């Protein structure tokens, strides 16, 4: 409980792009800002998020940004986050929505799937729903679809 009147504060969900989630796992420049966002918004993600995040963490290791020990710790954090997040699974509707989004916006396939999952998560009613992202094109498309975007710079 974190309210003075004794009632627990209800933390709203936001849909998190994988690239915005990575700083929660490792020590990156944006980590402090993203941790603050994680205290303000619970995590909703698409089913491919853990695979994308794992790929990103190993890429950071190969580039020398993370040490082997930091990578191991980051993977542990990712596993912990996975036990807490709300995940949108794959579906035919999601695939069709992603294909529609690819025709409409400058997105990569994975980003279109994430935005499609975000739309499915909110039942295609993104108004007053928060989308947290780091990718400019994806955030711009999410905003065009009606989400309130919180950009991790």
Image (cartoon, rainbow, N blue to C red):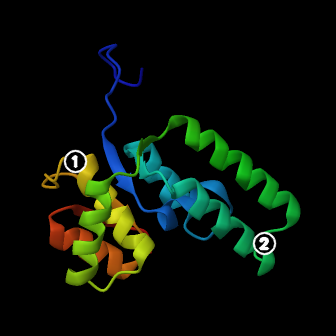
Query: Residue sitting at 23 percent across and 83 percent down?
Result: 103
Circle 2 — which element? helix
* The N terminus - image quarter: top left
Query: Residue sitting at 34 percent across and 71 percent down?
Result: 112
- Marks 2/1 in contact by CB < 8 Å: the verdict is no
Q: Nearer the viewer, mark 2 or mark 1?
A: 1
The percent position of residue 14, horizontal first and vertical second, equals 33, 49
Q: Earlier in the sequence, mark 2 or mark 1?
A: 2
Question: Tag 1: Cα neighbours inside 10 Å, few (<14), some, or many (≥20)?
Answer: some
Q: Is residue 133 above or below residue 138?
A: above
Query: Residue sitting at 35 percent across and 81 percent down?
Result: 107
Mark 2–mark 1 distance (CA, rounded to whole Å): 34 Å
Q: Which residue is mark 2?
A: 61
In the image, is 17 to the left or to the right of 32? Answer: left
Circle 1 — which element? loop
The percent position of residue 80, horizontal first and vertical second, equals 64, 39
The percent position of residue 146, horizontal first and vertical second, equals 14, 64
Question: Tag 2: Cα neighbours inside 10 Å, few (<14), some, or many (≥20)?
Answer: some
Query: Residue sitting at 72 percent across and 52 percent down?
Result: 75
Residue found at the very far bottom of the displayed protein:
106
* The C terminus - image quarter: bottom left
Numbered label tally? 2
In the image, is 65 to the left or to the right of 120? Answer: right
Q: Which mark is residue 122?
A: 1
Q: Nearer the viewer, residue 68 or 52?
A: 52
Q: Is residue 134 above or below residue 51?
A: below
């Amino acid at each position: 409980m974190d309210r003075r009147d004794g009632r627990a504060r209800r933390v709203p969900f936001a849909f998190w792009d994988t690239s915005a989630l990575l700083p929660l796992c490792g020590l990156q420049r944006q980590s402090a800002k993203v941790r603050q966002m994680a205290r303000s918004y619970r995590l909703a993600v698409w089913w491919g998020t853990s695979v994308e995040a794992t790929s990103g963490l190993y890429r950071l290791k190969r580039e020398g940004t993370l040490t082997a020990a930091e990578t191991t710790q980051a993977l542990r954090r990712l596993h912990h986050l996975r036990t807490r997040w709300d995940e949108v699974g794959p579906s035919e509707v999601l695939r069709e929505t992603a294909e529609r989004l690819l025709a409409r916006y400058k997105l990569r396939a994975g980003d279109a799937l994430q935005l499609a999952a975000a739309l499915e998560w909110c039942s295609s009613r993104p108004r007053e729903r928060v989308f947290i992202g780091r990718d400019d094109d994806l955030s711009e498309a999410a905003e065009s679809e009606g989400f309130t975007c919180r950009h991790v710079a």
